[in-house]
Each structure stands twice: as structure tokens, then as C-alpha cells.
Image (tube, coloured by chain):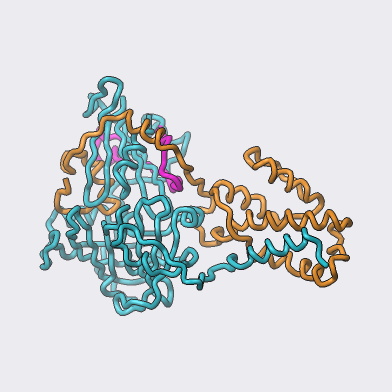
């Protein structure tokens, strides 16, 4: 007869073993709750462990994609994109057609839109296109589920995976190739379950011709910010926010050498934070002269607005300007901004 | 158990349990994964890999009516029984880390922000008077940062 302590030990081990098999699926049919009723993938998914994706820029390919940016009325502006990637780090992302919110027909993009894409193509692939971050954050901040069956995306069978934000910051849907986990589409939702941004691949060519491609190069020289070394280039010690949304972590700190582009412009310290999927910039820049927004009665003034679905808070401290930017509820961005001083 | 400097943030009971393991050598990764698990504030499954190491000895003990001591690790059955319980409990705690630490983790040492009270959150916001403006009233740097995250609207949202 086994001693009680041994029985307890074996029982605990057995209990532990049930769910610890790496990559195993929970076949119990656990259903994720939907958020706001519009997030269909959440309603019927089977719980899964954290997926691993591959990303288009890791492949030698050319793909056509359609980006939707939804406004507050639920109407989407659409951008038809052409992505070239050589699989070794070189990319080119251009916009080829544009359709205004809710309009069915494509039109040629404006010169301003072409320029926005051209200047920021590497950032769009790196920051706008969704990537999964630290596994600790993905484990803590999201509950993962998959809808049964597959869907065809650009002629490729794809899994439909849903990430539910446990902190209520907005869910995500992913479309990943069954064969190699290549991420071919995604949708971002706001906390109420309304879509805010959606990207879907419409065609992929794995034998591309890159002969006329002008690869992206950064519009502003930049490098990782090194504490202790880079402060003279910045002109002030960067401030760290005292508050971050639960589950966020510091992904990287970079120094953008804006002064090299335009004399008189302060270099920018940009800290990038993530909860594993959502990204958040906290940026700071030295300003010369009178702040654009005064400090009155012991309170600071700051502006906020939404730019294409991305929230922005901007304001001046004595000697510097701070920016908090991300696809998060405005109240979160304002709380982070207020924690800077 | 192999001595590692104990983190003062570890719960007292866990500290005692770790010390109570005496000469049992824990897997080296156990320490950092217990720490990570506590940092994440969650308790989950035990690691399959650790289970595989322990399971043969447990099975042998169970089959023999627990009269044998496993491979000379300990000499006292009563102590062994206690250590098994402690080890099992630790495995559950340590399992947190095994699941999401892997060779493909881009940020294996990420320190995640914790919860903060709604009162403190409100206090941060109260330090600032926020004014809603149109996107065109923001600076070019602010617009540029938003566009880098995909805020490429050709229309003014405000």
C-alpha cells in the first residue's frame, strides 16, 4: 500500500502531465467567449497552445495584399499592397491602389500616400504587420483558440487562429498556412470586438522576379539606444513610464537620428513596448524654444487624436516633447502619458 | 538541493520547501523557471521533460510498494515521501516556464508589467489635461510614429 504522501505526489504529477505535452491541443472542445459579439472566430474555437508563425519577410516571395483600416462607422479604407521579400532581410512594400472608406472601386493612390508608404515601408513590415512576441507575454496576455476546418487564402489552405486578450485590449484573428505556418492574414479588433485593421494576402509568388525592385532603406538613420552612451546625442536623460498596461514589456529602445535629416530637429528616443501582439511607442525628443503646449495650474496639457486607427497622445514637458502611440484604448495611452512625470 | 542564491521575493513556504529537498539535485533550469513563473503570476502545468526524468523512479517505487529508495538520492523513506510531494508541487509551479520558453522565443527574458490599481491609473491621468484634436493638428513626428504602426489613413479620422 502506498503512503498518502506518495499517492499525493503521483496524483499531482499525473494531473500535471495531462496538460503539459508541448504543442498538444485540448480536445475537450473548450469554447472561448466572444468579445462584443462581432468576433466570430472567438465563438467556436477549440483551445490551443501558443502557435508559431512564419512571416512573409522570412521568405523569398512576392505577394499582393489588401489592407483594410476601419473607421468609427465600420467602413474600411482599402489599400492594395505589393510586397517583395528576398528572404534575407530585404523588403519593398508599395501601395498600388486605394479605395476610400466604403467605396467599391479602386483608384490610383495619391502622391502623399505613395510617399508615406515609401518612407515607412520597412516600419510597416516590422511594426504594423503583426508578429508574435515573447512567449511569456503571449501566454499571460492571450487565450488561444482555433476554428475547425481550413479556409483558402491566396490559394493556400490556412488555419484560423484567434487570440483573445485577457486584459480586454482587443483580440486578433490570424490566418496561417497549414503547411508551414506562414502568416497570410490577420484582423485586429478593438476592445468591443469591432475590427480596426485587417490584412489579407490575395496572391503569393514563391518564384518572384526582384530585378526592378528598389529595396527599402530607412528614411531616418537609427540604431539601438545604448544607456549611458547615447544621452549626449539625445540631449536629455530619457524618461521611463511608471505605468504600462498589464502584461506589457520593453521590446527595444532606439535612437532615431532626426537631426541628421533636418538641422534643428532633435533626435528621438523611441521605446517600443509589447504585450506579445499589440505594440506601443513611447517616444521623446528635445525641443528648442517655447513648448507648443503650456503647463498651467500644475497640470500639463496634451493633445490626443486617432490617426488611421492608431491612437496618439502628444505633449510638451519642460525641454522635451513626448509621444505615446499605439493601437490601444485612448485611456490606456493617456494613463501611460500621465505616468511619464 | 544545489544551492542557488534565494530570491527574497520568493514566498517563504516555497523557500522552505526548496531547502527541504536537501541533497536532491533539481534540474538547473528549475530555478529560473520558478522565478519566471512567479513573475508572470500564474501557476500552470508541470513540464513534460521534468516528468520524464522523474516518472521511471516514481513508477518503480509504486510497483515495489515504496520500500526501495531511488538511486541513492535519499535514505529515509519518510523523507523521500515528503520530498516527492514537494517535488510534485514544484513541478506544477515550474511548469509555467517550460511551456513558453523555447528556442524560438524572441524575448525569453521579458519582464512583464504587473497590475496597477484603478485609483493609481486615474491619478496618472489626472496630472494632465487632455484635449482632443484632429490628426492634422498633431506634429509631423506624432503622425509619422502613428503611420509606422499602420495609421495610414488618407482621410482624417477626427
> In this orientation, does residue A217 appear?
no
> In this orientation, does residue B57 appear?
yes
A195 vs A222, nearest the viewer: A195
Image coords of residue B21 (percent x, y): 78, 51
Most frequent secondary structure within the magenta stretch: loop
Q: Indicate whether residue A341 is drawn in magenta.
A: no
Image coords of residue A262 (percent x, y): 24, 38
Locate residue A6: give its quadrant.
Answer: bottom right
The residue at the far top in this view is A297
The residue sitting at 73% across, 53% down in the picture is B86
User: Which chain appears cyan?
Assistant: A
Q: For the magenta stretch, what is the residue range?
A: A238-266
Image coords of residue A146 (percent x, y): 41, 69
Q: Is residue A72 left or right of residue B68?
A: left
Q: Quadrant of the C terminus of chain A?
A: top left
Q: Indicate whether residue A240 is drawn in magenta.
A: yes
Image coords of residue B51 (percent x, y): 68, 65
Q: Quadrant of the N terminus of chain A?
A: bottom right
Locate residue A96: give its quadrant.
Answer: bottom left
Q: Chain B shown in which color?
A: orange
A194 vs A314, nearest the viewer: A194
The residue sitting at 54% across, 59% down in the picture is B100
The residue sitting at 34% across, 78% down in the picture is A156
Amino acid at each position: 500500500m502506498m503512503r498518502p504522501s506518495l499517492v499525493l505526489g503521483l496524483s499531482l504529477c499525473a494531473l500535471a502531465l495531462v496538460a503539459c505535452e508541448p504543442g498538444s491541443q485540448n480536445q475537450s472542445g473548450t469554447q472561448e467567449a466572444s468579445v462584443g459579439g462581432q468576433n466570430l472566430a472567438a465563438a467556436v474555437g477549440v483551445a490551443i497552445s501558443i502557435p508559431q508563425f512564419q512571416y512573409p519577410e522570412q521568405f523569398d516571395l512576392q505577394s499582393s495584399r489588401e489592407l483594410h483600416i476601419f473607421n468609427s462607422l465600420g467602413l474600411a479604407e482599402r489599400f492594395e499592397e505589393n510586397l517583395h521579400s528576398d528572404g534575407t532581410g530585404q523588403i519593398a512594400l508599395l501601395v498600388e491602389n486605394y479605395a476610400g472608406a466604403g467605396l467599391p472601386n479602386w483608384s490610383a493612390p495619391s502622391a502623399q500616400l505613395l510617399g508615406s508608404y515609401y518612407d515607412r515601408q520597412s516600419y510597416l513590415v516590422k511594426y504594423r504587420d503583426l508578429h508574435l512576441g515573447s512567449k511569456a507575454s503571449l501566454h499571460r496576455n492571450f487565450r488561444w483558440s482555433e476554428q475547425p476546418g481550413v479556409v483558402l487564402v491566396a490559394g493556400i489552405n490556412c488555419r484560423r487562429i484567434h487570440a483573445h486578450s485577457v486584459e480586454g485590449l482587443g483580440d486578433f484573428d490570424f490566418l496561417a498556412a497549414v503547411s508551414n505556418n506562414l502568416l497570410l492574414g490577420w484582423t485586429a479588433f478593438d476592445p468591443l470586438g469591432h475590427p480596426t485593421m485587417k490584412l489579407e494576402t490575395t496572391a503569393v509568388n514563391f518564384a518572384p522576379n526582384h530585378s526592378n525592385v528598389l529595396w527599402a532603406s530607412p528614411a531616418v538613420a537609427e540604431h539601438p539606444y545604448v544607456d549611458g552612451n547615447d544621452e549626449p546625442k539625445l540631449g536629455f536623460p530619457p524618461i521611463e513610464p511608471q505605468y504600462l498596461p498589464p502584461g506589457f514589456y520593453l521590446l527595444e529602445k532606439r535612437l532615431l537620428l532626426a537631426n541628421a535629416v533636418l538641422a534643428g530637429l532633435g533626435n528621438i528616443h523611441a521605446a517600443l513596448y509589447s504585450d506579445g501582439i499589440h505594440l506601443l511607442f513611447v517616444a521623446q525628443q528635445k525641443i528648442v524654444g517655447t513648448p507648443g503646449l503650456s503647463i498651467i495650474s500644475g497640470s500639463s496639457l496634451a493633445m490626443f487624436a486617432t490617426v488611421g486607427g492608431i491612437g496618439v497622445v502628444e505633449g510638451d514637458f519642460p525641454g522635451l516633447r513626448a509621444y505615446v502611440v499605439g493601437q490601444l484604448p485612448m485611456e490606456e495611452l493617456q494613463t501611460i502619458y500621465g505616468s511619464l512625470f | 538541493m544545489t544551492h542557488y542564491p534565494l530570491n527574497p521575493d520568493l514566498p517563504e513556504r516555497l523557500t522552505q520547501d526548496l531547502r527541504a529537498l536537501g541533497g536532491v539535485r533539481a534540474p538547473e533550469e528549475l530555478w529560473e523557471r520558478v522565478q519566471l513563473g512567479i513573475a508572470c503570476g500564474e501557476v500552470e502545468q508541470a513540464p513534460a521533460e521534468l516528468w520524464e526524468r522523474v516518472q521511471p523512479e516514481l513508477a518503480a517505487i509504486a510497483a515495489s510498494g515504496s520500500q526501495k529508495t531511488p538511486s541513492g538520492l535519499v535514505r529515509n523513506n519518510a523523507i523521500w515521501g515528503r520530498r516527492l510531494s514537494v517535488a510534485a508541487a514544484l513541478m506544477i509551479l515550474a511548469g509555467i516556464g517550460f511551456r513558453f520558453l523555447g528556442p524560438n522565443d524572441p524575448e525569453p527574458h521579458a519582464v512583464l508589467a504587473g497590475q496597477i490599481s484603478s485609483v493609481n491609473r486615474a491619478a496618472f491621468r489626472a496630472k494632465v489635461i487632455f484635449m482632443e484634436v484632429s490628426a492634422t493638428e498633431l506634429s509631423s513626428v506624432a503622425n509619422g510614429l502613428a503611420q509606422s504602426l499602420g495609421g495610414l489613413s488618407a482621410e482624417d479620422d477626427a
